[in-house]
Image: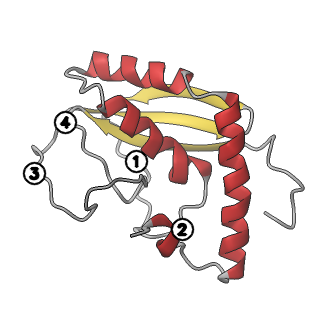
Amino acid sequence: MLDRFRNFNNIFFSDEAHFHINGHVNKQNCRYWSSENPKTKHQRPLHSPKVTVWAAISANGIIGPYFFEDFRGRGWPRDSCPDLTPADFFLWGYLKHRVYAHKPKTLFELKAKIRNEMSAISVSLCRRVFENFRARLEECRSRNGDHLNDIIFKK
């Protein structure tokens, strides 16, 4: 991508993520910073009601959210890519952090919080995310395509 595109301003990256009522976060699909130990086990009820959200992000803003219930997903293999896209390294972790801070109790409330928080993401924040995207690509290239574990999981 670094060789092919001068800038990434007109590229949209799309993805979907599950949002559970109980606040469950699949740490394989999103990354976020926390002062707490990310490897601590958390007890969660099995089969919490959830909604799947699709969105696309570019340097110029966000398209979405679009909601799907009972979505089974695409079945990507674990650790199939180094989580470089802005949806992976920014959007889902940021959005879940903001949405779950409100502790929604129903799917209706969960969807409303997702809509509100997604619409509050500014174009200037999206532009900063895409500047970071270029830096991540350059770092990945310097590592010959290896994962950025020491960047993603800073201690």
Residue 48 visible within the image = yes
The disc at residue 22 is 4
Q: Nearer the viewer, residue 113 or 153?
A: 153
First in sequence: mark 1 vs mark 4:
4
- SS at badge 4: loop
Q: Residue furthest bottom?
A: 144
- SS at badge 3: loop
Q: Which residue is pictured at 87% across the width and 57% down the height? A: 5
Mark 1, other Cα within 10 Å: few <14 / some 14–19 / many ≥20: few
**Coordinates of residue 109 in the picture (x, y in percent):** 29, 17
Q: Which residue is pictured at 36% across the width and 41% down the height? A: 18
The residue indicated by pointer 3 is 43
Q: Which residue is pictured at 55% across the width and 34% down the height? A: 55
Seen in the picture, residue 75 relative to 8 is either above or below; the reply is below
Q: Which residue is pictured at 38% across the width and 38% down the height? A: 96
First in sequence: mark 2 vs mark 1:
1
The residue indicated by pointer 1 is 73
- SS at badge 2: loop
The residue indicated by pointer 2 is 81
Q: Amino acid at mark 1?
A: Gly
The disc at residue 93 is none
Q: Amino acid at mark 4?
A: Asn
- SS at badge 1: loop
Seen in the picture, residue 37 relative to 150 is either above or below; the reply is above
Q: Amino acid at mark 2?
A: Cys
Which image quadrant is residue 19 in? top left
First in sequence: mark 3 vs mark 1:
3
Nearer the observer: mark 2 or 1; the answer is 2
CA distance for labels 3 and 1: 23 Å
Which image quadrant is residue 63 in? top right
Nearer the observer: mark 3 or 2; the answer is 3
Say which quadrant the N terminus sits in.
Answer: bottom right
